[in-house]
Image (cartoon, grey):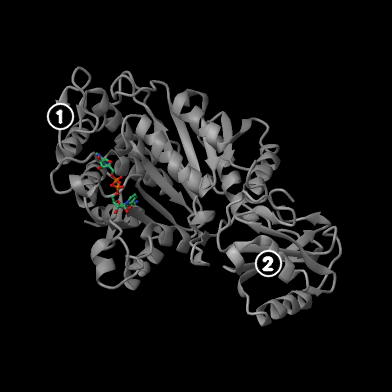
Amino acid sequence: MYLILSVELINQQIMTKITVAKGDGIGPEIMDATLKILQAAGAKLEIEPIEIGEKVYLDGHKSGIAPESWESLRRTKVFLKAPITTPQGGGFKSLNVTTRKTLGLYANVRPCKSYHPYVATKHPVMDVVIIRENEEDLYAGIEHQQTDEVTQCLKLITKPGTEKIIRFAFEYAKAYGRKKVACFTKDNIMKLTDGLFHKMFDEIAKEYPEFESEHWIVDIGAAKLADTPENFDLIVMPNLYGDILSDVAAQITGSVGLGGSANIGAEYAMFEAIHGSAPKRAGQDLANPSGLLLGAIQMLVYINQPKVAERVHNAWLKTLEDGVHTYDLYKENVSKEKVGTSGFADAVISRLGQRPQKLEAVHYDEGLNHQVQGSYSKAVPAKKDLVGVDIFLHWNGEDRDPNVLGEILSKITSGPFKNNLITNRGVKVYPDGLPETFCTDHWRCRFTSENMDLPGDYKNVIALSQRISDLGLDIIKTENLCRFDGERAFSLGQGQ
Ligand code: NAD
């Protein structure tokens, strides 16, 4: 009796609490299939269910999650999440973005591998991990309509955010035996934001000389990834490029339904499929549960149940290899049996303990994922000089002739600052603009000293703003122009 109790106690002790949400659309079906497989494989999980998604949104919670559900996440710190449907319009916020940012899940890990010849793909040799920065970039969610014609979304790239994700990428490469780390940015255009990402990649890569490292401009990098994915191993990217290209990469392995993802933070983690709730496929026992299952396998590694992860992953590979496929993978002459969501789960369960014969079997070490974190150090404050200001105006006057606006602003000065540039959508239109340039009602008016080198004072910015406003002009916003340790820290206008 005593012995049985002790064993039970030990079993209870090694149970890991996780929060589980079944989501919307195909979510409940693929989650049931995934949990059935995990349970059959002997995963030690104590599940706390929460509700998220459409119903919660429509109950009035703008982020798709009720306040009490955060309590469960705070307790378990591990979230296995099925996809949800975000209602259109109505000011609803994306639950995924909210969860990632609230819980500090800065790293999104998306392995994309092909399973040739058992899953039809144009890319028989493909095994790429995409590591997507998860909290910043255009997903900061700071958007404004500024004029009748112009809307704006702020792209934020921070030093700590960039340092964390790039270190995470190299640490992940180390833990998982990857050889080559690539970085995609668009720093030929966005020299400050993507430029920071690229620069930090080059700096941090020097600390990991054992890896081949390379940078690609995202457009040609994406084209190469879609064309010859076998040339890539691990790619780290800012948020938006990573979001788009991980879907492309998952789809070209054979189906977006094969993509699983881990969202990792310093304290919390969330695991999911990369696809959405596919409402058209819901309730028909059709969907492929593989994406969520592969997310759950990453979760098992993360909570230090690597042997269960290995058992499930190898049984899943054997199922694919045996040609047991859901509709999205099924191909005459390649597949042997077409199954639904639950049939696929049963097929995996019946192969637990088996390993694939032709596809490469997986092996997971103890403590693997806990090694993988990205560290950062606080930036050392630089000497910061204010050398000017961009004052943005909503102006519709005089046929939108930039020379008229330039003439008005030429009379306004403060300290060393006077107007010496007006741009429209970033292109110089005053002085000496070209008449062909199309102008909207949104004007960036730059006030600096002649050579942009004389420092002024914020009082000069206030005085300029006051005088411009007194003339009845509509100021949308101001943006300070600074030098950090003597280096210009703002972009020039096109044609400046
Ligand atoms: P989707 O990924 O849900 O589906 C696109 C298509 O991909 C489907 O029609 C289907 O043909 C295929 N597909 C996706 N998952 C599959 C699976 N498991 N098995 C087989 N085929 C699969 O994209 P969508 O239709 O653009 O979005 C539907 C909803 O999902 C939207 O409300 C969107 O906001 C939401 N969404 C949620 C998440 C998330 O919760 N993580 C992510 C993306 C989209």
* Amino acid type at image mark 1: Lys
**Label 1 sits on residue:** 338
Q: Against 48, is 262 above or below?
A: above
Give residue 273's position: percent from left, percent from top.
Answer: 33, 45
Give residue 236's position: percent from left, percent from top.
Answer: 54, 40
Residues 370 and 44: in front is: 370
Q: Residues within 10 Å of mark 2 (few under 14, many from 20)?
A: some
* Amino acid type at image mark 2: Leu
Q: Earlier in the sequence, mark 1 or mark 2?
A: 1
Q: Against 318, is 101 above or below?
A: below
Give residue 449's position: percent from left, percent from top.
Answer: 83, 64
CA–CA distance in space, label 1 to label 2:
68 Å
Residue 148 appearing in the image: yes
Residues 496 and 378: in front is: 496
**Label 2 sits on residue:** 405
Are the two marked residues, 1 and 2, in contact with CB atoms closer than 8 angstroms?
Answer: no
- Specify the quadrant of the image occupied by residue 249: top left
Please give the name of the residue rendered at 73% of the width and 67% of the height, measured from the top-left corner. Answer: 407
Please give the name of the residue rendered at 59% of the width and 42% of the height, measured from the top-left corner. Answer: 186
Please give the name of the residue rendered at 56% of the width and 41% of the height, measured from the top-left corner. Answer: 169
- Left or right, 245 with respect to 486, comes to left
